[in-house]
Image: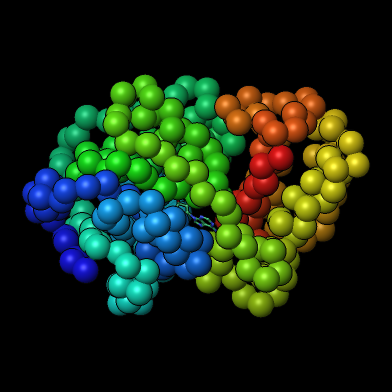
Amino acid sequence: MQIVKDAIELKKLRASLNGSVGFVPTMGALHEGHISLIKKARAENDFVIVSIFVNPTQFLEGEDLDKYPRKDEADIKICELAGVDIIFMPTIDSVYNEDELSITAPKIRGFILEGAKRPGHFDGVLQIVMKLFNITDATNAYFGKKDAQQLALITQMTKDYFLNVNIVPCEIVRDSRGIALSSRNTYLSEGEYERALSLSRSLKLASDMVAKSELDSSKIKVAMEDLLTKSVDKLDYVAIVDREFRELDKVEIGNSIILVAAFVGNTRLIDNIWV
Ligand code: AMP
């Protein structure tokens, strides 16, 4: 396994690879969610590149950029065990210049839900992902459904900009009690972890209602909100959208995503289910 810190060096190395490249972009502090993406990439490609980069442009003023968990040594071991060929751990200067041109998230899908609560976040995500796609020239790129809106916008970017990369959506990995794994879960105290279980419980409640043929979005959202407000400190949103992120009055089975975002303590958590 090689560790590359410079973008131009990685471009050269990539050009020497004969075969398909699976690419898994991450911000590190790797957990089983990331590992599931890496394993899928390993199974489906000749070479696997994982990037570990806490991208400053996707954090808003006052967010957790400075305290975001960094676990480089453990991450390198995890990648080695998972059969990764190349880890890309760029310095900021290696991927960013002064006074860059910018990519802006689409006006509608990019400015609802996460885009509304975190204005500018998706601009930063799309900017770094575009760079990483160009540096790695990946055949397939693996993204978790956990970040559903991010996945939708990146898929759209590949279409809008005629990129060659194929986007592979990956299932959400949860712990034994149902919480979606996230690097940010390490911020949670024991008590907060218990309260954070309400996110996945609210989604379970929603899917149970759908299973009993309750498709009315407002009824499902009220039930979820009732459950969530008892446990979380601030509910950012509960939403039911189709796979194109258009709001739905009625759940469309096979074409819907039910999403939740909330603060537990100072930690902002997101989760969703695809129904
Ligand atoms: P991050 O390091 O949080 O930026 O995540 C890197 C990639 O891993 C993104 O595509 C995420 O959607 C994905 N990911 C994060 N957590 C999970 C999870 N619990 N299950 C599946 N994929 C995940």
Residue drawn at x 23%, y 61% is 86
Q: How many marks?
A: 0
- Tell me if residue 247 can be seen: yes
Q: Quadrant of the N terminus?
A: bottom left
| Residue 188 image point, x, y percent | 59, 70
Query: Vertically, is 228 above or below 3?
Result: above
Q: Is residue 31 left or right of residue 136?
A: right
Q: Is residue 221 left or right of residue 82?
A: right
Q: Is residue 59 left or right of residue 90?
A: right
Residue drawn at x 30%, y 72% is 80
Residue drawn at x 36%, y 58% is 42
Q: Is residue 159 left or right of residue 171?
A: left
- Tell me if residue 68 can be seen: no
Query: Vertically, is 207 above or below 86?
Result: above
| Residue 172 image point, x, y percent | 58, 54
| Residue 192 image point, x, y percent | 67, 70
| Residue 239 image point, x, y percent | 70, 37
What colour scheme was applied to this rendering of the protein? rainbow
Query: Vertically, is 145 above or below 195?
Result: above
- Residue 40: image quadrant is bottom left
Q: Quadrant of the C terminus?
A: top right
**Nearer to us in this view, 30 or 225:** 30
Residue drawn at x 72%, y 26% is 248
**Nearer to us in this view, 178 or 92:** 178
- Residue 240: image quadrant is top right
Query: Vertically, is 244 above or below 230?
Result: above
